[in-house]
Image: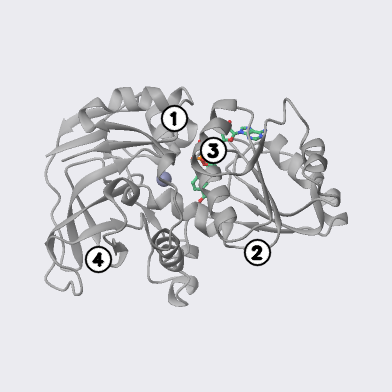
Amino acid sequence: MKALVKAKSEIGLVLSEVDKPSIGPKDVLIKVKTTSICGTDLHIWNWDNWAQSAIKTPMTIGHEFMGVVDQIGSDVKGLNVGDRVSVESHIAGTRSRNAKAGKLHLDPDTVNLGVDRDGAFAEYVSVPETNVVPLPDSVGDELGAILDPFGNAVHATLSFDLVGEDVLITGAGPIGIMSAAIAQYIGARRVLLTDINNERLALAQRVCDVETVNPTEQSISDKMSAMGLKEGFDVGLEMSGSELALKEMVDNMIMGGKVALLGLPSSEISLDLSKVIFKALNIKAIYGREIFETWYKGLALLESGLDIKNIITHNFEYSDFEKAFALLNDGKAGKVVLHWS
Ligand code: NAD
Ligand code: ZN
């Protein structure tokens, strides 16, 4: 079968012919239909320090996808050949305290699809049945392929009560934009989304109707005053990984405000913790999705009418992967989808 493989320790990926995966009794073989490229895949393409330490070559990459069940293991129950499915890419273990307590998203033995084991940028992928999520008919193939990053947005955005609250989101990447759409949909009073890239803010306007600001053009505090807020934002969602954005967020929170950190800084950052303490901020770090509560809530939001489809800006056939990665490396796209069949 065809697969996008990090074959050697060098920049890029190669489209290779590899063996179709085999499945064990508790596994499911999925015929991949639609995949989406994540920031993680870009790191792997660009072969940065993180990727070099994380990936053992050769590795088929990719973890954001949907497809159709092609084969089920002898012990698999509740899934049938032909089912449309997506997959939770964090494959949790069973031995840790958290895993045993059902907190699968906090299991330290988690293995990541497309990073630690062969992933979904291929015609077929094998995954444990426990990670398979059936898709409702109302969630189309393209949306089905981006449920993993959408789940990051759902997890972060639902981690605090947003109803009637004023929300600051820093970083209008796909996850920040989807979070803004969710915050607005579930009843936040005002939502301000920031980015230093105006193209990203323009994309945000095509997905949801929230306030936006480029903090290099207007300060967040000036924008906040213009929005009629006096004491600061009640809830902050940091989705850029930028040190500056985090500092600006702390400066613009209300006392006792709540902050969720999702953006990954590319290196160590500094923060004046006394500001966090004197503001009595409540900070929560977000990793991945709550397995499977985030999937339940996310699909429920989509089925009840949340519309995020415009976050998908480009579609390519898998053979055009080089164009797709180049576009993402230029910072010009939202979510980019590759079609496999
Ligand atoms: P992205 O890189 O596409 O978006 C980040 C955005 O932040 C970019 O548009 C960038 O222009 C903007 N930005 C940079 N500096 C800024 C500043 N000072 N103020 C405001 N905006 C600024 O990333 P994404 O795919 O949307 O993911 C968002 C972040 O979440 C990334 O850091 C990613 O690595 C991280 N992430 C974390 C998890 C997790 O489990 N915690 C999962 C997926 C992604
Ligand atoms: Zn991803």
Q: Nearer the viewer, mark 4 or mark 2?
A: 2
Name the kind of residue labelled 3 in the image: Ala
Residue 221 drawn above or below residue 136: above
Image quadrant of ligand 2 equals top left
Closer to the chain start, of discs 4 and 2, is 4
Q: Is label 1's Cβ within 8 Å of ligand 1?
A: no
Dot label at residue 333: 1
Dot label at residue 45: none
Position of residue 249 in the picture relative to residue 66 (left or right): right
**Residue holding disc 3:** 204
Residue 79: give x, y in percent of width and height. 19, 69
Name the kind of residue labelled 1 in the image: Ala
Q: Nearer the viewer, mark 3 or mark 1?
A: 3
Closer to the chain start, of discs 3 and 1, is 3
Task: Report the quarter where the N terminus lies.
Answer: top left
Mark 1 to mark 4: distance in Å? 33 Å
SS class, disc 4: helix
Dot 4 and dot 3 residues touching (CB under 8 Å): no
